Image: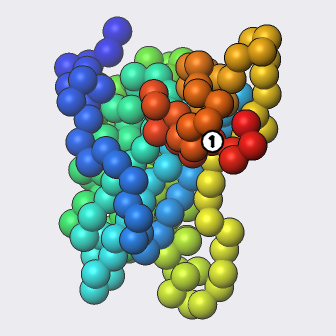
């Protein structure tokens, strides 16, 4: 079903993590359907010096994020702008048809991060992308993380499972 490349990037994802001093951030997806992807870029002399990701989703989404960071790192911004959903899927040696949307998420997140970089460079202030979902007690009286649906300590500012910030008054 999945290629060896997909399985390798799912089991051993590269470049995972949040980049606090990113020059550009792109976030795509929908927490309701389950796939959320954030790409962080660090640019030096118009070259993507570093690329990291945080992804909450299926194995294909994680593999897409991982290979996308490898494809983009070291490229000029102009070269990175040519990375497409098709080139990501090809680099993974294909994805099942029902998972091709994951490659769209990866390419879209990278392009969003590049747009954010250009906006910041031109002085345009954009809202900082934040995963802020309404916190609900949808499992009775217990608190659950809105990102990964694992039970959360009501006093904790972050989810111990996925590391996402929880609303102060949850």
| Identity of the residue drawn at 63% across and 42% down | 166
Q: Which percent across, then down, holds residue 97?
A: 50, 19
Most extreme residue toward the bottom, as rendered?
122
- Residue 115 vs 55, above or below: the answer is below
| Identity of the residue drawn at 69% across and 45% down | 167
Work out which quarter of the rendered image holds the C terminus and state it.
top right
Q: Which percent across, then down, holds residue 30?
A: 67, 36
Task: Return the residue nearer the eye: 169 or 165.
Answer: 169
Asked if residue 5 shows in the view, the reply is no
Q: Which residue is mark 1?
A: 166
Asked if residue 154 shows in the view, the reply is yes
Label 1 crowd bin: few (<14), some (14–19), many (20+), radius 10 Å: many
| Identity of the residue drawn at 71% across and 17% down | 142
- Tally of marks: 1
Q: Which percent across, then down, holds residue 69?
A: 31, 51
Q: Which percent across, then down, holds residue 117?
A: 49, 75
- Residue 79 vs 96, above or below: the answer is below
- Residue 42 vs 70, above or below: the answer is below
Residue 145 in which image quadrant? top right
- Residue 41 vs 167, above or below: the answer is below
């Amino acid at each position: 079903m999945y290629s060896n490349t997909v399985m390798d990037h799912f089991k051993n994802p590269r470049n995972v993590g949040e980049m606090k001093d990113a020059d550009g951030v792109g976030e795509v997806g929908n927490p309701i359907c389950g796939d959320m992807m954030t790409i962080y870029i660090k640019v030096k002399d118009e070259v993507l010096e570093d690329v990291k990701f945080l992804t909450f989703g299926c194995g294909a989404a994680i593999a897409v994020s991982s290979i996308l960071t490898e494809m983009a790192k070291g490229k000029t911004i102009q070269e990175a702008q040519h990375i497409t959903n098709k080139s990501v899927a090809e680099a993974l040696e294909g994805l099942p048809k029902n998972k091709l949307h994951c490659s769209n998420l990866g390419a879209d997140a990278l392009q969003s991060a590049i747009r954010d970089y250009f906006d910041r460079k031109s002085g345009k202030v954009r809202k900082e992308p934040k995963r802020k979902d309404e916190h609900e007690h949808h499992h009775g009286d217990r608190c659950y993380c809105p990102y990964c649906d694992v039970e959360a300590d009501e006093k904790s500012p972050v989810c111990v499972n996925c590391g996402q910030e929880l609303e102060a008054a949850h």
